[in-house]
Amino acid sequence: MSNGYEYDGIYYDSFDKWLDYIIEKLDLAIPPTKDIEDYIDIVIQENTKSIDDYKRGNKKAINALFGKVMKKFKGAETDTVKLLLEGRLNAVETISKT
């Protein structure tokens, strides 16, 4: 019996090699925070109604924005995305004054 790891019929002699393969195969690599921040800025610019709703006290409005970011960055840590998104939203002025 071996001490290695196997996936898809491929044998890996170390856990790290096996894990790297799984992360690549399943596209689970964690994106850089800067990439997430840049995309959050785009999402904010494209979703002014959700921003206005959030600024008016509807804290659930963040969920639609969160979903868009998570869809783009499937491997991102959810707590990190939520913190980055909340920080950006709190720094943004209300877009419309109606």
Image (cartoon, helix red, strand yellow):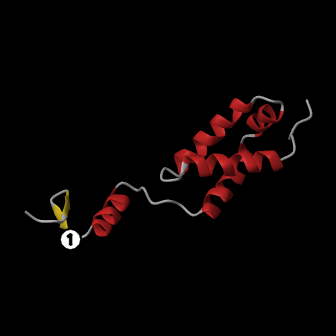
Mark 1, other Cα within 10 Å: few <14 / some 14–19 / many ≥20: few
SS for dot 1? loop
Q: Is residue 22 visible?
A: yes
Residue 58: percent from left, percent from top: 76, 28
Residue sitting nearer the eye, 19 or 88: 19
In this rendering, position of residue 19 left or right of residue 93: left
In this rendering, position of residue 60 left or right of residue 16: right
Q: Which residue corresponds to the image point at 67% horizontal and 49% vertical from the top-left?
A: 83
Residue farthest right in this picture: 97
Residue 97: percent from left, percent from top: 92, 34
Q: Which residue is mark 1?
A: 13
Q: Amino acid at mark 1?
A: Asp
In this rendering, position of residue 84 left or right of residue 9: right
Q: Which quadrant of the structure image shows residue 11? A: bottom left
Q: Quadrant of the N terminus?
A: bottom left
Q: Which residue corresponds to the image point at 62% horizontal and 41% vertical from the top-left?
A: 66
Q: Which residue corresponds to the image point at 57% horizontal and 64% vertical from the top-left?
A: 32
Q: Is residue 45 visible?
A: no
Q: Which quadrant of the structure image shows residue 15? A: bottom left
Residue 68: percent from left, percent from top: 59, 43
In this rendering, position of residue 13 left or right of residue 32: left
